[in-house]
Image (cartoon, rainbow, N blue to C red):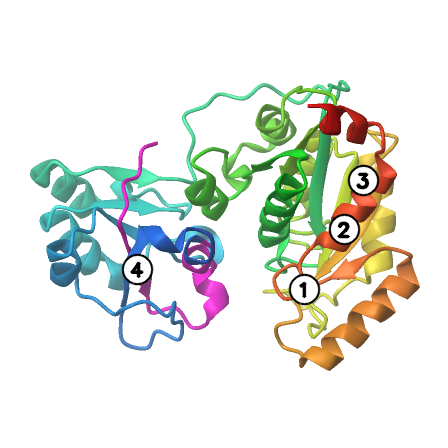
Amino acid sequence: MSILPPYLMFLGDVPDRLAAKTAYGIVDWRRDWCLGQLRLDGCQADLDLPDLTVAEAAAQGAKTLIVGIVNAGGVLNEAWIPTILEALASGLDVASGLHIRLGSDPRIAEAARTHGRQLFDVRHSDQRFATGKGTKRPGLRLLTVGTDCSVGKKYTVLALERAMRERGLKADFRATGQTGVFISGRGVAIDAVVADFISGAAEWISPENEPDHWDLVEGQGSLFHPSFAGVTLGLLHGAQPDAFVVCHEPTRTRMRGVEHPLPSIADVIDLTIRCGRLTNPAIRPVGIAVNTEALAEDEARRVLEGYAAEHGLPATDPIRFGVGTIVDRIEADFPAAAPLRRSA
């Protein structure tokens, strides 16, 4: 896909910022690509970008309207259709990470044809995947796993990529969700892959590589989430991680969208190791990444210190405090990669 910036970020009428996490992720990591935002009445999210109409954005050079919304089932809301049609008529392409293809709506498909514009459905891949084989392949891999959905798995691996590269380590972010694909320009939305091929798609994302190269694989869902555990398990088996980081939001008591209680970090570590050993018997945890946005700084530090002491792992908020302690642990636990890296 070749999705052209600058972007006009469309938030529709989302009820909170988590429902616009695709838009937030793009802005957080590719802010220079984002010209402004367009919000409908009742929208409860704000990207801290200029509010623009479609006409204003087109006049300022916007190339693509990004539907930066995440909702249950990935459905295309009827209230958004007029904005999408206006964007196409104004000369913008439209890109979406929803499950529902933009072109499945005949009005959108016809408008794209009439105005010669492109529709990008990032969640859908034309790539054909094999079934997973589980064969050990060269290279090193790290996967983020979660106590729940939307707890920072993508942000953690992006922060790790930046920090590891700054130290001279060979590391690449591997996107497994629509937002990650927007950010990296490559990857596959793993939750849109037919179930039999999830682990094979994960193997395709993180193929064999140099012995000292790290593929940093974006995690999805949670092994404990009744809606998404199947996707999480297939990704775990296909990614075949040597290391994993547990991601957590400390103020939640129940998992997002369901009534099930949040599992403990210890439960996640234990189940990830037991399930992950199927394709990598040497899998191990190397850190805990905690989203402390809802906590004051002093309280956040106390919480992190408690998790670190309880689990014997570095615990940090990747955005607030960085991931240096986790990178320290990675280098300590995988010393064989360090001499190769330093001599490169």
Count residues near mark 1 (Cα–Cα under 10 Å), then give few for <14, some for 14-19, many for 20+.
few
Image quadrant containing the N terminus: top left
Of circles 3 and 4, the one toward us is 3
Residue 10 in sight from this viewpoint: yes
N-term mark: 2 or 3: 2
**Residue 326 bears which disc, if any?**
2
Q: Which residues are magenta?
A: 1-25
Residue 10 marker: 4
Q: Which amino acid, by three-letter code, is at mark 4?
A: Phe
Vertical position of residue 82 compared to residue 193: above or below: below
Q: Quadrant of the C terminus?
A: top right
Residue 21 covered by magenta stretch: yes
Specify few, some or many for label 3: CA neighbours under 10 Å numbering under 14, 14-19, or 20 or more: some
Left or right, residue 279 beside residue 319: right
Local SS, label 2: helix
Element on which disc 3 rests: helix
What residue is shown with label 3? 331
Label 4: few (<14), some (14–19) or many (≥20) C-alpha neighbours in 10 Å: many
Q: Residue at x 33, y 42 (%)?
A: 101
Q: CA distance from mark 4 to mark 2?
A: 35 Å
Instruction: Identify the residue position indicated by label 1 in the image.
Output: 321
Q: Earlier in the sequence, mark 3 or mark 1?
A: 1
Residue closest to the far front: 343
Please identify, in this view, whether the residue under mark 4 or under mark 2 is nearer the observer: 2
x, y percentage for residue 288? 77, 56
Q: CA distance from mark 1 to mark 4?
A: 30 Å
Return the residue nearer the eye: 241 or 306: 306
- Judged by depth in the image, the label closer to the viewer, 1 or 4, is 1
Residue 279 visible in the picture: no
